[in-house]
Image (tube, helix red, strand yellow):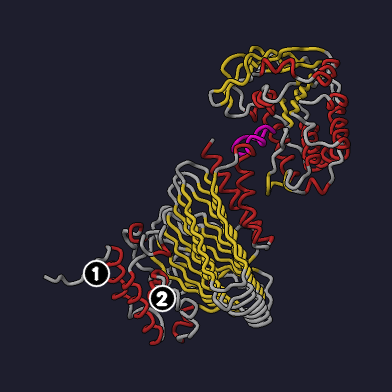
Amino acid sequence: MNAEPRILRTQAEETLALEFAAARTQLPGSPAIAAARENAFAAFQKQGLPHRRTEAWRYTDLRALLRTVPPLAIGPTAETSTLADPLPGLDRARLVVVDGSFRPELSDLAGIDGVTIRPLVDLLQEGDARIGLQVASLNDAMVSLNSALMLGGVAIEVPAGVRIERAIEIAHVTTSAVASHVRNLVTVGDDASVRILETHVGPAGSAYQANIVTEATAGHRAKVVWAKLQSEGDASVHLGTLAVTIGTETAFDHLTLMIGAAISRSQTFVTYSGENARAGLFGATMLRGKQHADIALSVDHAVPNGASRELFKAVMDGRSEGVFQGRIIVRPDAQKTDGRMMTQGLLLSEDASFFVKPELEIFADDVQCAHGATSGEIDEDILFYLLSRGLPRAEAETLLVTAFLAEAIEGLGDEAIGEAFEQISRNWLAARGQEAA
Amino acid sequence: MLEIKNLHASIDGKEILRGVDLIVPTGEVHAIMGPNGSGKSTLSYVLSGRDGYDVTDGEILFDGKDIVEMPAEERASAGVFLAFQYPLEIPGVATMTFLKAAMNAQRKARGEAELTTPDFMRRVKTAAEKLNVTQEMLRRPLNVGFSGGEKKRNEILQMALLEPKLAVLDETDSGLDIDALRVVSEGVNALRDPGRSMLVITHYQRLLDHIVPDKVHVMSAGRIVRTGGPELALELEAKGYADYAGEAA
């Protein structure tokens, strides 16, 4: 009577298996990459889509949320983007990735002399050993799926000692209802300095799915400012992962702004490989309607004398759901680690929810680690103070919410990028005010 | 200017104001004194339109018009100003940003043009100098890290810039030392004007040494129980509120 153990797959998982079987021989890469793809897909199949019982994905149940998957984006499309610039007025070089493929002819590489830009496809063909290195130990199903199906993206290399003032944007654009798996590689050499922007846009109403994995290393004494803007189309799914290793005395400041997509998750994994490095990790999330946005953070203090600061703010309206999972690991050798994490949620509606899960895993004894989380509504006393001075309610709320988010946005410490991102928050609030009027 | 008739108000079903009658003619400064719990602060909130207070009976006539149903922001634009007993700290909102937003919101509501930046800066500079409000304070987030005296001076600065027709000063003397009290009082006195009425709410007589009122009202158990001239404040200082405690019980 022993029944054969049977793996139940969802419709989406079945589709992915068929797609991988059909695409595997056409996907770009050396034999080593092809073998890595097979292993990665096997790893994905073993886990399946993350679900409620997958601890790291507990609040974003993709098995339930991803009923179907749209067709895979294969190769560069002829279409050029007509989508509006998400950061008007912000000076930067642009590397445009359309439907998963790098499009040099749409890109602007001025002002970044000394930096090497290559299509990731070239590195896949060469079997570049850096591909997959930063994500090798993540054991994350969606990263594995990306490793199996990754198509293109860009490789940015900032050689040692090169300091670039002009920001470099990796602009991810989706044009139709496809599933794209993008891989980027960013290598910042010792003593180098760079400002990276990562943007994600797509058409409204289109049920596309974007899965982007970026692997990065920042060398010793490097200075990296990295800002991500997720303003995907309102019916899309966004899954973004950044895995970065930082060296000795490196300063890494990162900001995630989440405003788009129906379902989104942004994962950031930071590993310290050298002492006296400092990471600042900031986030600002703005949600309305039935949006769901999940920020997952993992900071791995593997060596002594590292410092990390995390400040994540989320504003939720309508029936939206915000999620923050923040993990700080202090390995046994990582004495004198100084880590401080704060999460604050502001609920603008009674139907909105905010889920917060701080996780501190501390194995060293001489460390300072603190975390805090708050969640609440707009303070009625403060609101009345503003009303009593004549500010209309919508304007008063806008002022308070802008100030609430600004603290996280300004944490990045980059004035130009901060101003551009604050403008996005003001626009979001202005649109909210108009809806209320 | 202000005429309150038989005003009853409650919070969470508990009646605090039990038939307040009060008239403050244009250009006059009236003081309301009374023991703790007599309803003085509630009256200031009800006048300024704070949510959560139910006016169950009576009228508040401001310039002859009943404002009971008017939201707080509209009352402000119509010329009602409340100087808070405990001014709120608002992290992330620069004092200058707040002042400009408030002034322009009121101008907009009255159909006036917004202030140009130079005009705004000039007005703030002039008013701030009179109140010893430094440029450094103006650059800080609103009231954040301000001392008690700085917060109260900032309230009077807002009053000077917003030029209300009716200013309600709720326990403006609380938490002030003698020097701060003098600066704040001088600021208030400078704003006395034939076109402006003031209602000064205080527990102690000492504020009225500096801001001499035209009339003093005693509030107890949610009603005005006695009205007199400035000498009434001195009498209360000498005898205390014991005579009125019975009514508060």
User: Which residue is at 54% across, 39% downward?
Assistant: A434
The answer to which image quadrant residue A437 occupies is top right
For residue A132, above or below residue A437: below
Q: Amino acid at mark 1?
A: Ile
Res B172 seen here? yes
Between A356 and A332, the one lying in front of the other is A332
Q: What is the distance, in whole Å, between disc 1 and disc 2 at their CAs?
A: 22 Å
Decide if residue A56 is on the left or right side of residue B159: left
Q: Chain of mark 1?
A: A
For residue B217, above or below residue A330: above
Q: Chain of mark 2?
A: A
Neighbor class of circle 1 (other Cα within 10 Å; few <14, some 14-19, many 20+) is: few
Residue A396 on image: x %, y %:
63, 39
Residue A11 on image: x %, y %:
27, 63
Decide if residue A199 is on the left or right side of residue A277: left
The answer to which image quadrant residue A32 occupies is bottom left
Q: Residue furthest left?
A: A1
Between marks 1 and 2 in the image, the one whose residue lies nearer the viewer: 1
Task: Give the overall secondary structure of the magenta segment.
Answer: helix
Magenta stretch: residue A187 in it? no
Which quadrant is home to the N terminus of chain A? bottom left
* Residue hosting label 1: A7
Tell which circle, 1 or 2, labels the residue nearer the N-terminal end.
1
Between A397 and B38, the one lying in front of the other is B38
Secondary structure under the numbered disc 1 in the rendered image: loop
* Residue hosting label 2: A147
Segment tinted magenta in the rendering: A383-395
Between A23 and B223, the one lying in front of the other is B223
